[in-house]
Amino acid sequence: MRDDAERRRFEHAEAGGVVHADYARRPGLLVIRHVYAPPVLRGTGAAGRLMEAVAAQARAEDRRILPLCGYARAWLAASPAHRDLLA
C-alpha cells in the first residue's frame, strides 16, 4: 500500500488498476471517506486487501477507524480481527 499524503488517499496497485481509500487523519482517528475499486478489480478482493493494509496502518498509528464509506464500514463490521478498530 502507498500513502499519497498530498492527495490524502491510500493506494493499492494490482494488475488492471489501483484501488484507493480517501482518508483524513484526526486525533486518534483515521477517517475513511470513500473506497474505490475500478470496474476491472471489483469482485476480486482488491478492496479488501486495501482495507487490510489500512487496518494495519491504523494500528501502527494507534488510531481507530471512522468509516464514512459504506464499504469500509461493512468490511470492518465483518472482520472479527479488525472490528476493535471501528470508532
Image (spheres, grey):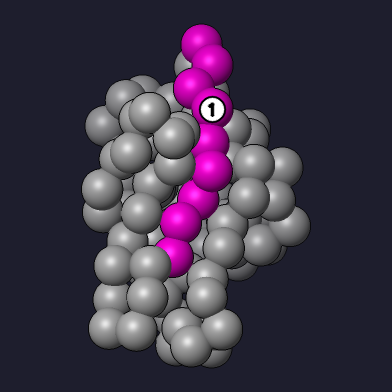
Q: What residue range appears in magenta? A: 19-27
Residue corresponding to mark 1? 24
Query: Where is residue 30 drawn, in percent x and y?
Result: 51, 30
Q: Is residue 7 magenta?
A: no
Q: Is residue 19 above or below residue 29?
A: below
Quarter that holds the N terminus = bottom left
Depth check: give the residue in front, 25 or 9: 9
Question: What is the chief secondary structure element of the magenta stretch?
Answer: strand
Left or right placement of residue 4 versus residue 47 in this view: left
Task: Inspect the image, locate mark 1, and give the three-letter code of the amino acid beneath it.
Answer: Ala
Depth check: give the residue in front, 72 or 12: 12
Residue at the (72%, 42%) spot, across then down = 68
Residue at the (58%, 57%) spot, across then down = 35
Query: Is residue 24 in view from this perspective?
Result: yes
At mark 1, the secondary structure is: strand
Residue at the (38%, 67%) spot, across then down = 18
Residue at the (44%, 42%) spot, across then down = 9
Query: Where is residue 76 drawn, in percent x and y?
Result: 57, 55
- Toward which corner of the image does residue 87 lie, by quadrant? top right
Q: Is residue 66 above or below residue 80?
A: above
Query: Where is residue 58 drawn, in percent x and y?
Result: 38, 35
Q: Is residue 70 above or below residue 56?
A: below
